[in-house]
Amino acid sequence: MIEFKAVTKRYSNGAIGLQDASFTIQKGEFVFVVGPSGSGKSTLLKLILHEEVPTEGEVYVNGFSIHNMRRSEIPYLRRGLGVVFQDFRLLPNKTVYDNVAFAMQIVEAQPKEIRRHVPVALALVGLSKKAKVYPDQLSGGEQQRVSLARALVNNPSILLADEPTGNLDPAISREIMYLLDEINQRGTTVIVATHEKSIVDDMEKRVISLDYGRIVHDVQKGNYTNEA
Amino acid sequence: MFKRGIIQMKLRTIKYMVREGFSNTYKNLLMTLASLTMVISSLLIFGVFLMVTVILSFNLRQMEKQIAEIVIWLEKDIAPLEADDIELRLKNDVRVLECNRITKEQAFAELNEALEDPSLLEGYTPEFLSESFRLRLKDVNQIAEFADEAADITGVEDIDFPKDFLERLALILKWINAGSMFILALLLIISVSIISNTIKLTVYARRKEIGIMKYIGANDWFIRWPFIIEGIIIGLVGSVISFVITSYLYNALESYVSSEAVVSGMSLIRMVPLKDIGGQILFVYIIIGVVMGVVGSIISVRKHLNV
């Protein structure tokens, strides 16, 4: 499903994003990518999204070769991926419903399908009652749930979350994580980049630890430090 | 599967884009007005220049027409029947607009009138003059060719037309045309860059939205089209408004010129009636306006698509 083969990413300013990283993520896995700021977590996610391309090595995602891909293919790669960001990235001039429906309009879904799937996605994140509200009237946790609903509405096989709880307080963070776990239970591969130790230790999932762009640990049912 | 581009868009997607384009135009009213002002002022500058060129070359062409007279002199002792033949031949030529035969008597009378002292012609009869034809052609540009041909007709003695003057006029017209094309093209490029800068502001304001669309998996055309439609709307509205302003100004100028003509009894400038060129001007405005809008949009969005 996702495969990194000896991947190195050097940015044009010389900074190392990722160095000689190799790993495989199977369908249905839940993986934390952890490490301090600048350790390469974001680079790893950006490579999966084809926001960046590897300097060396090969990256395969859902059958797409990220290292060797036509520009016109990028939208199709991304349609198989759901993404959630730390800053939610909702469209402020659209309602909650429209923000989620928007993701389906982009992939030219039938209006009938849109009307059927959007409420389901909103129900899944527990926001059915806020469908007609605009994002700025919601709390941070609620906004992140909207962005989750948007990421899920097209039924992606992989869900990427880049510091999804970075702007949220611990209780709300936990809620979001349980939601991600639930989504994973339904068969979606979930990859979460975070540096929140308590959450990672709590969930007992596979943990890939990065430091200075290198994979230092890759442990099933691991914790943040993997020293225990 | 990846080839699905502009052509194969689904109808509802097109509807979505048109709706998006309209609602964006309305939602970003301030930016729309800024772009609109740019379109209108560019078109007005463009239009004034176009008008000046059109009126100038129209007047030069009128002048050309007035001057472009060919005089065909017949041999002095030509038989009247032969002269009739030549007249028939000239009058039947498709290139000829009008052809007047000047008999010896008419020529003598004209000469008599031209000379201030009639005694100079005393003792002469019209017989010492030649008969001639005065012609105008439908197309002034054919005059040299026509004159060459006419010179070969038997019974024709000589051909006279203002060759140097017409050549010079043609050259001037050519330069005016080339120069105005150049300046109009320049104006167009400047306008497009101004407008694309204005649209860039609207795109910049919406770059987050574009980024989100890219992450969700929108392809480039899906993102581009609403902006293009916005550009088309601005271009269309701008060109119609510019046209209204232009025709108002033109009519004002026209009535001023014709009132001058009434007072002074003559007019140096002749205006082309608006109804003759209005359609073309509107057409040119719309084309330019829409091209400015569309090109401006495409240029402005391009940078933000590389995510």
Image (cartoon, rainbow, N blue to C red):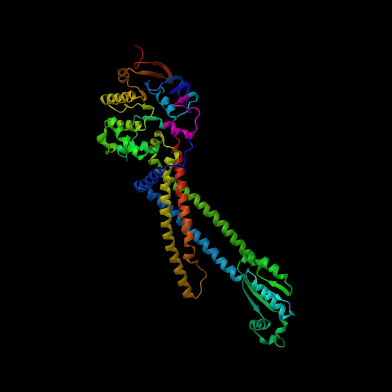
Q: Residue furthest left?
A: A129
Quarter of the view holding residue A28: top left
**Residue A59, horizontal then vertical, whole percent:** 47, 24
Task: Tell me the quarter of the image containing the C terminus of chain B.
Answer: top left
In percent of width and height, residue A135 lies at 29, 36
Quarter where residue A186 is shown: top left
Image coordinates of residue B12 in percent, x first then y, are 39, 43
Can you see residue A212? no
Q: Residue at x 43, y 49 (%)?
A: B232
Residue A186's place in the image compared with B120, above or below, is: above
Q: Quadrant of residue A209?
A: top left
Look at 41% across and 30% down and name the residue there: A80
Nearest to the observer: residue B124 or residue A71: A71
Instruction: Report the span colored magenta.
Output: A59-78
Depth check, front residue: A176 or B68:
A176
Residue that protrudes farthest toward the front in the picture: A112
What is the count of numbered marks? 0
Image check: B1 left or right of A179?
A: right
Q: Is residue B184 magenta?
A: no
Residue B246, placed above or below residue A154:
below
Q: Evaluate whether residue A55 shows in this view.
A: yes
Residue A180 relative to residue B68: left or right: left
Q: Position of residue B204 (x, y in %)?
A: 40, 41
Name above or below for residue B172 compared with residue B103.
Answer: above
Q: Is residue A25 left or right of residue B147?
A: left
For the point 27% across and 25% down, which residue is it? A175
